[in-house]
Image: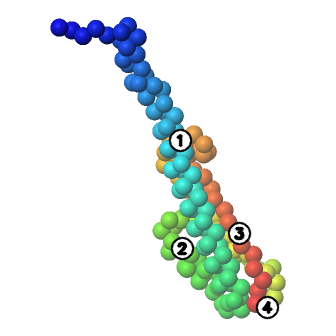
Amino acid sequence: MKKYQKPEARRESGQSMVEMALITPLLLLLLCGIIEFGIMFGTQLTIQNDSREGARYAAIHASESGVEDTIEMMLGTNAITSGKNITVTFTDATRKSGFVTVTVTTTIPAITPVGYMVFNDGEKEMLSATTMKVE
């Protein structure tokens, strides 16, 4: 014998499936945004540390020859931002005083569809510059 069901119960049988279908794209969009932001944040921290390390080395070893090459070799070994551009600029041509600025730029590709929607051409350029007094 079939059990009697209320008419309301029969009409709500697919409600949870419809709610899930409506909410899933929003959750995936949020997840992709979190992933892209995490990658950008990690890359920014990496190039900030690289520029700081390079500026400190250049401030201490300013009078030595080949400082720019040494900094590029030191900072170029990081696998996260291997395609980065490093610029070392001294304000004093004699390098006895003044300031040194190390600028690190890199380009990171978008990984998720959200990144392709937000970034131009699916890439984001990240920049960090550090200035220190020559010792």
- The reply to whether callout 2 and callout 3 are in contact (CB within 8 Å) is no
**Of pointers 2 and 3, the one earlier in the residue sequence:** 2
- Mark carried by residue 30: 1
Mark 1: which secondary structure?
helix
Q: Earlier in the sequence, mark 2 or mark 1?
A: 1
Which quadrant of the view contains residue 49? bottom right
Q: Are marks 4 and 3 in contact (CB under 8 Å)?
A: no
Distance between the alpha carbons at the discs numbered 2 and 4: 26 Å
Taking depth in this image into account, of 36 and 61 the one nearest to the observer is 36
Colour mode of the rendering: rainbow
In the rendered structure, are the residues bearing label 1 and label 3 in contact, judged by CB atoms less than 8 Å apart?
A: no
CB atoms of marks 2 and 1 within 8 Å: no
- Foreground mark, 1 or 3, reads 1
Residue at numbered disc 4: 96
Taking the spot 45% from the left edge, 33% from the top edge, the residue there is: 24
Q: Earlier in the sequence, mark 2 or mark 4?
A: 2
The residue carrying mark 2 is 76
x, y percent for residue 32: 50, 44
